[in-house]
Image (cartoon, rainbow, N blue to C red):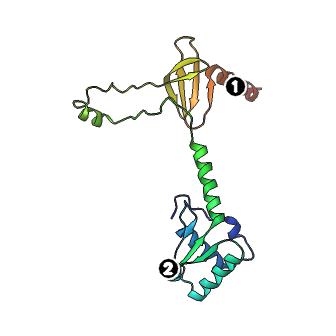
Amino acid sequence: MSLYFVGDLNVMYDKKLSPTDKLVYYCLVGFMNAKDGKCYPRYATIKERTGISRASIQRSIKHLAKLNLITIKRLASTNLYYLGRQKILQETIKRRVKSQFDTRDNSQRGVLIKPSYITNRYSKYNKTSPPPTDKHSISYKGETFEQCGSEGHWHEYYSKKSGKHIRKHSFKNIIEEVETSRKKFEAAAVKVVA
């Protein structure tokens, strides 16, 4: 079963499909390979999983193929089922999940933070590597900012050159100046009080 197993709700609410058709479809989705959208379960395997008779499974598969929900190809000992709509749905979900958690922060790329018991145990063998740094730095508007603190999902950075403070969200690619966020907070507080 794939990691992003989500059934097509259009199949669930389709009035043309019987409950048996829906059960057989979701059973096929459970066997589907997420990379190519194909599966190869035998009728006996589907019968074992769903508790439906072989004749009902065959009728349901023919009906699903007639409605273009699946494509069937006969192989030597079983059928090949291609679930095109389900494959597209799962690829869309993967892209959304990846884009939601994808950050483009280059400051921490390649940094591996090891627990102290691992670094202390191997430190006598690895004398050439530099000690791990606790602070990270990022570039913003041509300046280099070093991390000076964290609060929730926000990391605060400080520039020694200009004395400015900025903060960056951990998951989202949002960077804002601290003074700007303070002005927003004060403006919101004035509206609440007034």
Disc 2: which residue: 45
In which image quadrant can residue 102 be found? top right
In which image quadrant can residue 176 be found? top right
Label ID, residue 174: none
Q: Crowding at label 2, few (<14), some or many (≥20) Cα neighbours within 10 Å? A: few
| Secondary element type, mark 1 | helix
Name the residue located 53 percent from the left edge and 18 percent from the top edge: 144
Q: Is residue 31 above or below residue 177?
A: below
Amino acid bearing label 1: Lys
Amino acid bearing label 2: Thr
Mark 2 vs mark 1: in front:
2
- Most extreme residue toward the left is 124
- Most extreme residue toward the front is 76
| Secondary element type, mark 2 | helix
Disc 1: which residue: 184
Name the residue located 25 percent from the left edge and 34 percent from the top edge: 122
- Most extreme residue toward the right is 194
Instruction: Pick the residue in front: 38 or 174.
Output: 38
**First along the sequence among labels 2 and 1:** 2
Name the residue located 74 percent from the left edge and 77 percent from the top edge: 16
The C terminus - image quarter? top right
Q: Position of residue 87 (x, y in %)?
A: 61, 62
In which image quadrant can residue 170 be found? top right
From this viewpoint, is residue 53 visible?
no
Q: Position of residue 93 (x, y in %)?
A: 62, 54
Q: Position of residue 19 (x, y in %)?
A: 66, 78
Q: CA distance from mark 2 to mark 1?
A: 61 Å
Q: Are marks 2 and 1 in contact (CB under 8 Å)?
A: no
From this viewpoint, is residue 168 visible?
yes
Q: Is residue 159 above or below residue 92?
A: above
